[in-house]
Image (spheres, rainbow, N blue to C red):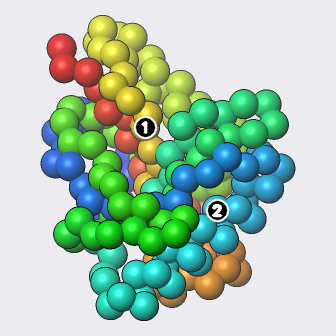
Amino acid sequence: MAAEKYSNDVELKQLAPQPVVSIRETVKIAALGEAQGDRLRVVSRYLQQRGVQHAGPPFVRYHTFGDTETDVELGVPVAEPMVGEGRIVAGELPGGPVITLWHLGAHDETLREAYARLQAWQNEHARQPSGTGWEVYFWIDVRQYRDSATWPDLSDWRTQLVQPLAEP
């Protein structure tokens, strides 16, 4: 992807609905990294066993985020709707108006600042969120994922934040 695509600017877009397969569970925040790695391995293996190609990088949606637990969904986009099995469910990321923002680097305090920029844009433009947003992890290759050892250096992480918006 071109470097200019990774800006700090909030961008308003229109997305089509995107079929996905995912695992959603409540996990302890202290075990979040391990839980996400486990879910990514399970979903990746599920797609490989069925000969299904992913249609984009993995995403994470935090449906709730408390002090000690989070209701988190990790998924992978697929080209066509498919059936889930066991913990893996089929669904879709919603279409419609969204705002997006690129975050570069590790998920530290700067990620919190990126979310604050999304909120500031919504306030400035008098727009309301419509549902839970998600993070798209462009730095994870689903086809080659085994564990966090396959991740690139933190400075190379490219994460897109996506927040659906209510119609004006």
Q: Position of residue 33 (x, y in %)?
A: 72, 60
Mark 2 is surrounded, within 10 Å at the Cα level, by few (under 14), some (14 to 19) or many (20 or more) other residues, namely many
Residue placed under numbered mark 2 in the picture: 36
Q: Quadrant of the C terminus?
A: top left
Residue nearest the viewer, comparing 162 with 60? 60
Marks 1 and 2 in Cβ contact (< 8 Å): no
Q: Please say whether residue 137 is visible from this viewpoint.
A: no
**On the rendered structure, is 35 left or right of 121?**
right
Q: Quadrant of residue 32?
A: bottom right
**On the rendered structure, is 122 left or right of 79?**
right
Q: Residue at x 62, y 51 (%)?
A: 25
Q: Position of residue 119 (x, y in %)?
A: 46, 21
Q: Quadrant of residue 82?
A: bottom left
Kind of residue at badge 2: Gln
Q: Residue at x 40, y 68 (%)?
A: 84
Q: Position of residue 57 (x, y in %)?
A: 40, 67
Mark 1 is surrounded, within 10 Å at the Cα level, by few (under 14), some (14 to 19) or many (20 or more) other residues, namely many
**Res 133 label:** 1
Q: Residue at x 30, y 82 (%)?
A: 53
Q: Please say whether residue 53 is visible from this viewpoint.
A: yes
SS type, badge 1: loop
The answer to whether 104 is drawn above or below residue 144 in the figure is above
Q: Earlier in the sequence, mark 1 or mark 2?
A: 2
Kind of residue at badge 1: Gly
The answer to whether 48 is drawn above or below residue 80 in the figure is below
Q: CA distance from mark 1 to mark 2?
A: 17 Å
**On the rendered structure, is 77 left or right of 61?**
left
Residue nearest the viewer, comparing 65 with 121? 65
**On the rendered structure, is 20 left or right of 157?**
left
The answer to whether 53 is drawn above or below residue 119 in the figure is below
Q: Position of residue 99 (x, y in %)?
A: 31, 33
